[in-house]
Amino acid sequence: MAQNMTAKRDAEKHPWKRYLLKYFMVTLGILLDAIALELFLVPNSVLDGGLTGISLMIQYKTGWPLGLIVSVFNLPFIFLGWKQVGKRFAVAYTYALAVFTLFTQMFHHVAPVTENELLSVVFGGFLLGAGVGLVLRGGACIDGTELVALMISRKSNVSTGTVILIFNLIIFTVASLLFGVDRALLSLLTYYIASRIIDKVEEGLDTAKQVIVITDDAEPIADAIYKRLGRTVTISSARGLVSGKKEMLYVVITRLELPELREIVEESDESAFITISDVNEIIGKHVQKVDKAVVEELEA
Protein backbone atom coordinates (compact mmCIF):
# COMPACT_ATOMS: atom_id res chain seq x y z
CA MET A 1 0.00 0.00 0.00
CA ALA A 2 2.81 2.39 0.94
CA GLN A 3 4.61 1.58 -2.32
CA ASN A 4 1.47 2.39 -4.33
CA MET A 5 1.12 5.77 -2.59
CA THR A 6 4.80 6.53 -3.24
CA ALA A 7 4.44 5.62 -6.90
CA LYS A 8 1.34 7.84 -7.20
CA ARG A 9 3.11 10.84 -5.61
CA ASP A 10 6.12 10.24 -7.87
CA ALA A 11 3.87 10.20 -10.94
CA GLU A 12 2.26 13.46 -9.85
CA LYS A 13 5.67 15.17 -9.64
CA HIS A 14 6.75 13.82 -13.05
CA PRO A 15 3.96 14.15 -15.67
CA TRP A 16 5.80 11.94 -18.18
CA LYS A 17 5.65 9.08 -15.67
CA ARG A 18 1.89 9.59 -15.33
CA TYR A 19 1.45 9.37 -19.10
CA LEU A 20 3.74 6.35 -19.25
CA LEU A 21 1.63 4.62 -16.59
CA LYS A 22 -1.59 5.44 -18.46
CA TYR A 23 -0.32 4.06 -21.75
CA PHE A 24 1.07 1.01 -19.99
CA MET A 25 -2.44 0.32 -18.64
CA VAL A 26 -3.92 0.82 -22.10
CA THR A 27 -1.34 -1.51 -23.68
CA LEU A 28 -1.85 -4.20 -21.02
CA GLY A 29 -5.61 -3.89 -21.39
CA ILE A 30 -5.42 -4.29 -25.17
CA LEU A 31 -3.16 -7.32 -24.72
CA LEU A 32 -5.77 -8.98 -22.47
CA ASP A 33 -8.54 -8.09 -24.94
CA ALA A 34 -6.60 -9.62 -27.85
CA ILE A 35 -5.94 -12.81 -25.88
CA ALA A 36 -9.60 -13.05 -24.84
CA LEU A 37 -10.86 -12.59 -28.38
CA GLU A 38 -8.35 -14.57 -30.43
CA LEU A 39 -7.57 -17.43 -28.00
CA PHE A 40 -10.98 -17.91 -26.35
CA LEU A 41 -13.96 -16.25 -28.07
CA VAL A 42 -13.23 -16.17 -31.81
CA PRO A 43 -12.27 -19.88 -32.11
CA ASN A 44 -15.59 -20.80 -30.49
CA SER A 45 -17.68 -18.31 -32.51
CA VAL A 46 -18.69 -16.31 -29.44
CA LEU A 47 -19.51 -12.62 -29.89
CA ASP A 48 -19.01 -9.51 -27.77
CA GLY A 49 -21.24 -6.45 -27.60
CA GLY A 50 -20.81 -3.05 -29.27
CA LEU A 51 -18.80 -2.40 -32.42
CA THR A 52 -16.54 -5.34 -31.55
CA GLY A 53 -19.57 -7.64 -31.75
CA ILE A 54 -20.47 -6.30 -35.21
CA SER A 55 -16.83 -6.67 -36.27
CA LEU A 56 -16.79 -10.28 -35.04
CA MET A 57 -19.88 -11.11 -37.12
CA ILE A 58 -18.21 -9.67 -40.22
CA GLN A 59 -14.98 -11.50 -39.40
CA TYR A 60 -16.80 -14.84 -39.07
CA LYS A 61 -18.48 -14.34 -42.46
CA THR A 62 -15.51 -12.89 -44.41
CA GLY A 63 -12.33 -13.99 -42.65
CA TRP A 64 -10.99 -10.44 -42.66
CA PRO A 65 -8.59 -9.45 -39.81
CA LEU A 66 -10.58 -8.56 -36.69
CA GLY A 67 -8.31 -5.68 -35.65
CA LEU A 68 -8.62 -4.05 -39.06
CA ILE A 69 -12.43 -4.27 -39.04
CA VAL A 70 -12.66 -2.83 -35.51
CA SER A 71 -10.29 0.04 -36.43
CA VAL A 72 -12.25 0.96 -39.57
CA PHE A 73 -15.54 1.01 -37.63
CA ASN A 74 -14.01 3.18 -34.90
CA LEU A 75 -12.33 5.78 -37.14
CA PRO A 76 -15.33 8.18 -37.16
CA PHE A 77 -15.55 7.93 -33.37
CA ILE A 78 -11.98 9.19 -32.93
CA PHE A 79 -13.12 12.55 -34.30
CA LEU A 80 -16.27 12.36 -32.17
CA GLY A 81 -14.15 11.63 -29.10
CA TRP A 82 -11.95 14.65 -29.90
CA LYS A 83 -15.02 16.90 -29.99
CA GLN A 84 -16.88 15.40 -27.03
CA VAL A 85 -14.10 14.45 -24.58
CA GLY A 86 -10.86 16.09 -25.69
CA LYS A 87 -7.61 15.82 -27.62
CA ARG A 88 -5.85 13.53 -25.14
CA PHE A 89 -8.70 11.05 -25.26
CA ALA A 90 -8.64 11.01 -29.08
CA VAL A 91 -4.87 10.39 -29.12
CA ALA A 92 -5.19 7.56 -26.58
CA TYR A 93 -8.15 6.16 -28.57
CA THR A 94 -6.04 6.11 -31.76
CA TYR A 95 -3.15 4.46 -29.95
CA ALA A 96 -5.45 1.81 -28.48
CA LEU A 97 -6.88 0.92 -31.90
CA ALA A 98 -3.40 0.66 -33.46
CA VAL A 99 -2.16 -1.64 -30.70
CA PHE A 100 -5.41 -3.66 -30.85
CA THR A 101 -4.89 -4.25 -34.57
CA LEU A 102 -1.30 -5.35 -33.96
CA PHE A 103 -2.05 -7.70 -31.05
CA THR A 104 -5.10 -9.37 -32.62
CA GLN A 105 -3.06 -10.06 -35.75
CA MET A 106 -0.22 -11.50 -33.62
CA PHE A 107 -2.54 -13.94 -31.83
CA HIS A 108 -4.75 -14.75 -34.82
CA HIS A 109 -2.77 -17.85 -35.85
CA VAL A 110 -2.09 -19.06 -32.30
CA ALA A 111 -3.93 -22.22 -31.27
CA PRO A 112 -6.94 -21.61 -28.95
CA VAL A 113 -6.47 -22.26 -25.26
CA THR A 114 -9.56 -24.44 -25.04
CA GLU A 115 -12.35 -25.70 -27.28
CA ASN A 116 -14.77 -26.02 -24.39
CA GLU A 117 -17.45 -23.39 -25.00
CA LEU A 118 -18.31 -22.78 -21.35
CA LEU A 119 -14.65 -22.34 -20.35
CA SER A 120 -14.15 -20.00 -23.31
CA VAL A 121 -17.10 -17.86 -22.26
CA VAL A 122 -16.05 -17.65 -18.59
CA PHE A 123 -12.34 -17.01 -19.05
CA GLY A 124 -12.76 -15.05 -22.28
CA GLY A 125 -15.35 -12.81 -20.64
CA PHE A 126 -13.15 -12.33 -17.58
CA LEU A 127 -10.07 -11.35 -19.62
CA LEU A 128 -12.12 -9.16 -21.92
CA GLY A 129 -13.67 -7.28 -19.01
CA ALA A 130 -10.31 -6.83 -17.27
CA GLY A 131 -8.77 -5.56 -20.49
CA VAL A 132 -11.54 -3.08 -21.27
CA GLY A 133 -11.46 -1.85 -17.67
CA LEU A 134 -7.71 -1.16 -17.87
CA VAL A 135 -8.13 0.62 -21.20
CA LEU A 136 -10.84 2.87 -19.73
CA ARG A 137 -8.74 3.59 -16.64
CA GLY A 138 -5.92 4.59 -18.96
CA GLY A 139 -8.16 7.20 -20.59
CA ALA A 140 -8.90 5.40 -23.88
CA CYS A 141 -11.42 3.01 -25.40
CA ILE A 142 -11.77 0.64 -28.36
CA ASP A 143 -15.51 0.88 -28.91
CA GLY A 144 -17.32 4.03 -30.02
CA THR A 145 -20.72 2.74 -28.91
CA GLU A 146 -20.43 4.45 -25.55
CA LEU A 147 -19.68 7.84 -27.14
CA VAL A 148 -22.84 7.59 -29.24
CA ALA A 149 -24.80 6.53 -26.17
CA LEU A 150 -23.51 9.55 -24.26
CA MET A 151 -24.65 11.89 -27.05
CA ILE A 152 -28.10 10.30 -27.20
CA SER A 153 -28.52 10.46 -23.43
CA ARG A 154 -27.65 14.17 -23.41
CA LYS A 155 -30.37 14.90 -25.95
CA SER A 156 -33.03 12.66 -24.38
CA ASN A 157 -34.23 11.26 -21.07
CA VAL A 158 -32.74 7.81 -21.85
CA SER A 159 -29.69 6.86 -19.78
CA THR A 160 -26.39 5.86 -21.36
CA GLY A 161 -26.63 2.36 -19.92
CA THR A 162 -30.08 1.87 -21.45
CA VAL A 163 -28.88 2.99 -24.89
CA ILE A 164 -25.92 0.58 -24.75
CA LEU A 165 -28.18 -2.25 -23.58
CA ILE A 166 -30.66 -1.68 -26.43
CA PHE A 167 -27.81 -1.53 -28.96
CA ASN A 168 -26.33 -4.80 -27.71
CA LEU A 169 -29.70 -6.55 -27.60
CA ILE A 170 -30.08 -5.73 -31.30
CA ILE A 171 -26.62 -7.19 -31.96
CA PHE A 172 -27.39 -10.41 -30.08
CA THR A 173 -30.75 -10.72 -31.83
CA VAL A 174 -29.02 -10.49 -35.22
CA ALA A 175 -26.42 -13.00 -33.97
CA SER A 176 -29.19 -15.47 -33.09
CA LEU A 177 -30.49 -15.25 -36.68
CA LEU A 178 -27.04 -15.66 -38.23
CA PHE A 179 -25.40 -18.18 -35.90
CA GLY A 180 -28.25 -19.72 -33.91
CA VAL A 181 -29.80 -19.11 -30.52
CA ASP A 182 -27.11 -21.07 -28.66
CA ARG A 183 -24.34 -18.76 -29.94
CA ALA A 184 -26.37 -15.69 -29.10
CA LEU A 185 -26.96 -16.90 -25.54
CA LEU A 186 -23.27 -17.73 -25.07
CA SER A 187 -22.41 -14.25 -26.38
CA LEU A 188 -24.91 -12.65 -23.99
CA LEU A 189 -23.33 -14.54 -21.08
CA THR A 190 -19.87 -13.36 -22.18
CA TYR A 191 -21.11 -9.79 -22.33
CA TYR A 192 -22.56 -10.05 -18.83
CA ILE A 193 -19.35 -11.49 -17.35
CA ALA A 194 -17.21 -8.86 -19.09
CA SER A 195 -19.44 -6.00 -17.91
CA ARG A 196 -19.23 -7.17 -14.28
CA ILE A 197 -15.43 -7.34 -14.45
CA ILE A 198 -15.27 -3.89 -16.03
CA ASP A 199 -17.39 -2.72 -13.10
CA LYS A 200 -14.69 -3.92 -10.69
CA VAL A 201 -11.64 -2.78 -12.65
CA GLU A 202 -12.83 0.58 -13.92
CA GLU A 203 -14.73 1.71 -10.77
CA GLY A 204 -18.25 1.35 -12.06
CA LEU A 205 -20.40 1.51 -15.17
CA ASP A 206 -22.67 4.35 -14.09
CA THR A 207 -23.34 7.13 -16.54
CA ALA A 208 -22.16 9.87 -14.21
CA LYS A 209 -19.59 10.43 -11.48
CA GLN A 210 -19.71 13.18 -8.90
CA VAL A 211 -16.34 14.69 -8.06
CA ILE A 212 -15.50 16.85 -5.05
CA VAL A 213 -12.16 18.65 -5.01
CA ILE A 214 -10.75 20.41 -1.94
CA THR A 215 -8.06 22.89 -2.93
CA ASP A 216 -6.46 26.21 -1.96
CA ASP A 217 -7.45 27.98 -5.20
CA ALA A 218 -10.50 26.71 -7.05
CA GLU A 219 -10.67 29.21 -9.93
CA PRO A 220 -7.86 27.79 -12.15
CA ILE A 221 -9.24 24.27 -11.81
CA ALA A 222 -12.82 25.38 -12.48
CA ASP A 223 -11.73 27.37 -15.56
CA ALA A 224 -9.76 24.41 -16.95
CA ILE A 225 -12.70 22.03 -16.39
CA TYR A 226 -15.02 24.44 -18.19
CA LYS A 227 -12.64 25.02 -21.12
CA ARG A 228 -11.43 21.44 -21.62
CA LEU A 229 -14.52 19.45 -20.64
CA GLY A 230 -17.32 21.98 -21.08
CA ARG A 231 -18.63 21.28 -17.57
CA THR A 232 -19.80 23.93 -15.16
CA VAL A 233 -18.55 23.71 -11.58
CA THR A 234 -20.05 24.66 -8.23
CA ILE A 235 -17.55 26.41 -5.92
CA SER A 236 -18.04 26.91 -2.21
CA SER A 237 -15.94 27.81 0.81
CA ALA A 238 -14.67 25.08 3.10
CA ARG A 239 -12.59 24.86 6.24
CA GLY A 240 -10.32 22.03 7.35
CA LEU A 241 -9.83 21.25 11.02
CA VAL A 242 -6.03 21.33 10.55
CA SER A 243 -5.47 22.86 7.12
CA GLY A 244 -7.75 25.86 7.69
CA LYS A 245 -9.45 27.83 4.90
CA LYS A 246 -10.04 25.92 1.67
CA GLU A 247 -12.26 25.99 -1.41
CA MET A 248 -14.45 23.12 -2.59
CA LEU A 249 -15.46 22.30 -6.17
CA TYR A 250 -18.36 20.04 -7.08
CA VAL A 251 -18.86 18.73 -10.62
CA VAL A 252 -20.75 15.88 -12.27
CA ILE A 253 -19.04 14.25 -15.26
CA THR A 254 -19.11 11.06 -17.31
CA ARG A 255 -16.67 8.24 -16.67
CA LEU A 256 -14.88 8.90 -19.99
CA GLU A 257 -14.07 12.42 -18.78
CA LEU A 258 -12.68 11.23 -15.44
CA PRO A 259 -9.04 10.72 -16.55
CA GLU A 260 -8.98 14.20 -18.10
CA LEU A 261 -10.38 15.75 -14.91
CA ARG A 262 -7.73 13.99 -12.82
CA GLU A 263 -5.05 15.52 -15.03
CA ILE A 264 -6.57 18.99 -14.74
CA VAL A 265 -6.55 18.84 -10.93
CA GLU A 266 -3.03 17.40 -10.73
CA GLU A 267 -1.68 20.07 -13.10
CA SER A 268 -3.20 22.88 -11.02
CA ASP A 269 -2.75 21.58 -7.47
CA GLU A 270 -0.80 18.40 -6.66
CA SER A 271 -1.91 18.57 -3.03
CA ALA A 272 -5.64 18.79 -3.84
CA PHE A 273 -7.93 16.27 -2.12
CA ILE A 274 -10.31 14.49 -4.52
CA THR A 275 -13.27 12.21 -3.87
CA ILE A 276 -15.12 10.40 -6.66
CA SER A 277 -18.41 8.56 -6.27
CA ASP A 278 -21.20 7.13 -8.39
CA VAL A 279 -24.36 9.08 -9.15
CA ASN A 280 -27.46 6.89 -9.14
CA GLU A 281 -29.93 9.50 -10.37
CA ILE A 282 -29.81 13.03 -11.75
CA ILE A 283 -32.83 15.33 -11.71
CA GLY A 284 -32.47 18.42 -13.86
CA LYS A 285 -30.18 19.43 -16.71
CA HIS A 286 -27.07 20.32 -14.71
CA VAL A 287 -25.01 17.41 -16.04
CA GLN A 288 -25.49 18.47 -19.66
CA LYS A 289 -22.29 19.48 -21.37
CA VAL A 290 -21.70 23.01 -22.60
CA ASP A 291 -20.93 23.08 -26.32
CA LYS A 292 -17.31 24.05 -27.04
CA ALA A 293 -18.49 26.70 -29.49
CA VAL A 294 -20.26 28.42 -26.60
CA VAL A 295 -17.08 28.25 -24.51
CA GLU A 296 -15.06 29.83 -27.34
CA GLU A 297 -17.69 32.53 -27.81
CA LEU A 298 -17.60 33.43 -24.10
CA GLU A 299 -13.80 33.61 -24.20
CA ALA A 300 -13.79 35.94 -27.21
Image (cartoon, rainbow, N blue to C red):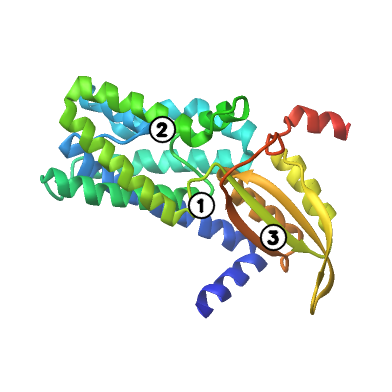
The residue drawn where x is 21% and y is 27% is: 60
Q: Which quadrant of the structure image shows residue 172?
A: top left
Q: Read off the residue under disc 3.
A: 266
Work out whether residue 34 can be spotted.
yes
Q: Read off the residue under disc 2.
A: 165
Q: Which mark is residue 138?
A: 1
Classify 10 Å Cα crowding around label 3: few (below 14), some (14-19), many (20 and above).
Answer: some
* Mark 3 or mark 2: whose residue is earlier in sequence: 2
CA separation in Å, label 3 and label 2: 34 Å
Classify 10 Å Cα crowding around label 1: few (below 14), some (14-19), many (20 and above).
Answer: many
Amino acid tagged 1 = Gly
| Spot occupied by residue 104 in the image (x, y as percentages of width and height) | 30, 41
The secondary structure type at the circle numbered 2 is helix
Please identify, in this view, whether the residue under mark 2 or under mark 1 is nearer the observer: 2
Classify 10 Å Cα crowding around label 2: few (below 14), some (14-19), many (20 and above).
Answer: some
The secondary structure type at the circle numbered 1 is loop
Amino acid tagged 3 = Glu
The secondary structure type at the circle numbered 3 is helix
